[in-house]
Amino acid sequence: MTTRIAVTGAAGRMGKTLIEAINLAEGCELTAALERPDSSLVGADAGELSGLGKNGVKVSGSIDEVINDFDVLIDFTVPAATLANAKACGAAGKKIVIGTTGFSVEQKAELDAAVAEIAVCQASNFSTGVNLCFKLLEMAAGVLGDDVDIEIVEAHHRHKIDAPSGTALSMGQVVADTLGRNLQKVAVYGREGQTGARERETIGFATVRGGDVVGDHTVSFFAEGERVEITHKASSRMSFARGAVRAAKWLADQGAGRYDMRDVLGFN
């Protein structure tokens, strides 16, 4: 059975990569593509936009126009757009894969309500390697426990609008959960001036932005005399796109509920 997939932000960097990944995946077909209503690319051929040649799928400026043309929507855009698309999918009983990060507390609550009765796979990162790192972080935190200082450093391209990255926050959450800590209370987002000695229970975050870095993340566990580092470096958006398409294909067979990439990979 072929999974019919729609892609939002079809003319963006990630949207084009998602369309390419769908083209390469077995059992999947791009059947709808979306852009902002005011985009000059509405009406263009989605295949041509992605450099694949014409595929007959025209870019639409409204999800309502294509709501019956897909089984699963993949959304890697911005919180406001994702929330609107999630509401449309929830009302129509469509499934959705969400890779958007940077939601506010209020937006998260609104999103939860919008997708309460449909199948949704949401993750801060859809790379298989990153999700393997989540598993490794659980192991490292469990073994090293409270005898180490933990710091997370992430780097992304200059166009990324949220910081720290959703992936860095997820890594911090994995470590905090394993150690029984409340991340909201122990997270330190940058240091300046006379900060005093480091408190052991804190989890530090540092953010780097520049150039065309796709995504680098390192979690360091500092002990006396040694340190353990778990690092993931992405050199192409295709690693995220392939994972998202894999998630969409998997989600097509699932009932209503909240899932993440670790469910897709069988890690949970």
Image (cartoon, grey):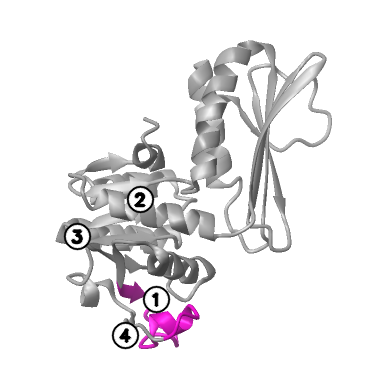
User: Can you say whether 38 is above or below 15 in the image?
Assistant: below
Q: Amino acid at mark 4?
A: Gly
Which residue matches tag 1? 35
Which residue is at 63% across, 14% downward?
144
Which residue is at 54% across, 42% downward?
129
Marks 4 and 3, Cα distance to the nearest angstrom?
A: 21 Å
Which residue matches tag 2? 247
Which residue matches tag 4? 56
Which residue matches tag 3? 1
Q: Earlier in the sequence, mark 3 or mark 2?
A: 3
Residue 92 visible here: yes
Which residue is at 48% across, 23% downward?
177
Answer with the quarter of the image where residue 95 lies: bottom left
Q: Position of residue 84 (x, y in %)?
A: 31, 62
Q: Which residues, given as a range, are shown in magenta?
A: 31-53
Query: SS at mark 2?
Result: helix
Most prominent secondary structure in the magenta stretch? loop
State the residue in front, 132 or 60. Answer: 132
Answer with the quarter of the image where residue 91 lies: bottom left
Q: Amino acid at mark 2?
A: Ala
Answer with the quarter of the image where residue 27 lies: bottom left
Query: SS at mark 3?
Result: loop
> Which of pointers 3 and 2 indicates the residue nearer the eye?
3
Query: SS at mark 4?
Result: loop
Q: Earlier in the sequence, mark 2 or mark 4?
A: 4
Query: SS at mark 1?
Result: loop
Q: Amino acid at mark 1?
A: Glu
Marks 1 and 2, Cα distance to the nearest angstrom?
A: 22 Å
